[in-house]
Image (cartoon, rainbow, N blue to C red):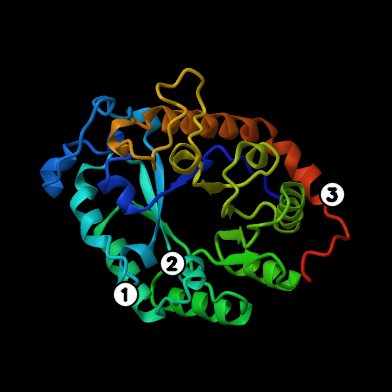
Amino acid sequence: MAEVKNDHFRLVMAIDVGDLKQGKLNCLVGTDVDNLFGESIARSFAAKKIGPDSQPSLLLSYYHLAGSRRYRGWRDFQKLRPHLLIRDWQLDSGAFSAHTLGASVDLAAFRDFALEALATDPKLLEVFSLDVIGDWRASERNAERLWAAGVPVIPTYHVGEPTEVLLNMARTYPKIALGGAVGLPPTTKREWARQCLARVWPKPVHGLGFGGATYLKDLPLSSADSTNVLLGPCRFGTWTQPGRPDRSVKLNSSVPASLFNLRIEIETAARLERSIRAKWWREGAALNEMLPADCREWKLSS
């Protein structure tokens, strides 16, 4: 088995375009948001922009960008895109978000959008396939059709699907993803992902929703995404760094979001990314022996 070292591990920050437009992430916009949208956004901490060593990768949802009448963030993103201080970005279909709202994502529309975005934006690095929630066969067909149309999507293996789906996916595609683990207890979620990795190692794997430090330190993923950079401060008023000004105030309170600079949270995520990259660089060779041997008679599917 070839030696694999995850020296290119990437931690991806899942966001909504509205977070940029509202000023929550002013540190990522290399210009004045007021000049782009004609809005009056108060600022105090937003003057210092993110440094080149901490510029993040972003994960954006097609459903929220252009996939529904309710969400039309693509024009806003196109306006912001030339000014964004980011390393690259990934496109997700947003099928899960649509499903929770009782909606769906049209395959042809998603295909055409992805083809145009890939052709016009060199920083669009990866595209995740369009899942059909609860129907792995339909999801499989979608991935095949998208590849045939010229969209090199990453398919996702979900909790509860037959093990052979995972193995076939790993044989067929250059990179795969693990997902559908929302709601599992952390220990079960981590063990499920580790057993998946043991069965397909050294296949590059993205962990959807596996961006927490506890998962990353135990799972040799090629990439993972996290909503914690935004959700911690915005929803719960929690910050990763002690002594953060106004760290007890939630960004969704009456205080304008643009008064807060999330640069410190993004820089923390960048440091985590570098430490995980270094860890699996050191331990990559050992994993070639250890991880496959860890494969147990453990039922991955229901």
- State which tag comes first along the sequence, 2 or 1: 2
Viewer-nearest of labels 3 and 2? Answer: 2
**Residue at 38% in and 32% down:** 262
* 3D distance between C-alphas at marks 1 and 3: 43 Å
Circle on res. 93: 2
Horizontally, residue 68 falls left or right of residue 9, namely left
Q: In what element is the residue under mark 3?
A: helix
- Three-letter code, disc 2: Ser
Residue at mark 1: 112
Image spot of residue 274 (x, y percent): 52, 30
Give 62 or 168, whichever is nearer the viewer: 62
- Three-letter code, disc 3: Ala
Whether the residues at callouts 1 and 3 have beta carbons within 8 Å, the answer is: no
**In this picture, is 212 found above or below 247?**
below
Q: In what element is the residue under mark 1?
A: helix
Viewer-nearest of labels 2 and 1? Answer: 2
Image spot of residue 48 (x, y percent): 27, 24
**In this picture, is 174 found above or below 88?**
below
**In this picture, is 222 found above or below 175?**
above
- Three-letter code, disc 1: Asp
* 3D distance between C-alphas at marks 3 and 2: 35 Å
Q: In what element is the residue under mark 2?
A: loop
Residue at mark 3: 293
Image spot of residue 142 (x, y percent): 50, 78
* 3D distance between C-alphas at marks 2 and 1: 12 Å
- State which tag comes first along the sequence, 3 or 2: 2
User: From the image, which quarter does the C terminus lie in?
Assistant: bottom right
Give 11 or 171, whichever is nearer the viewer: 11
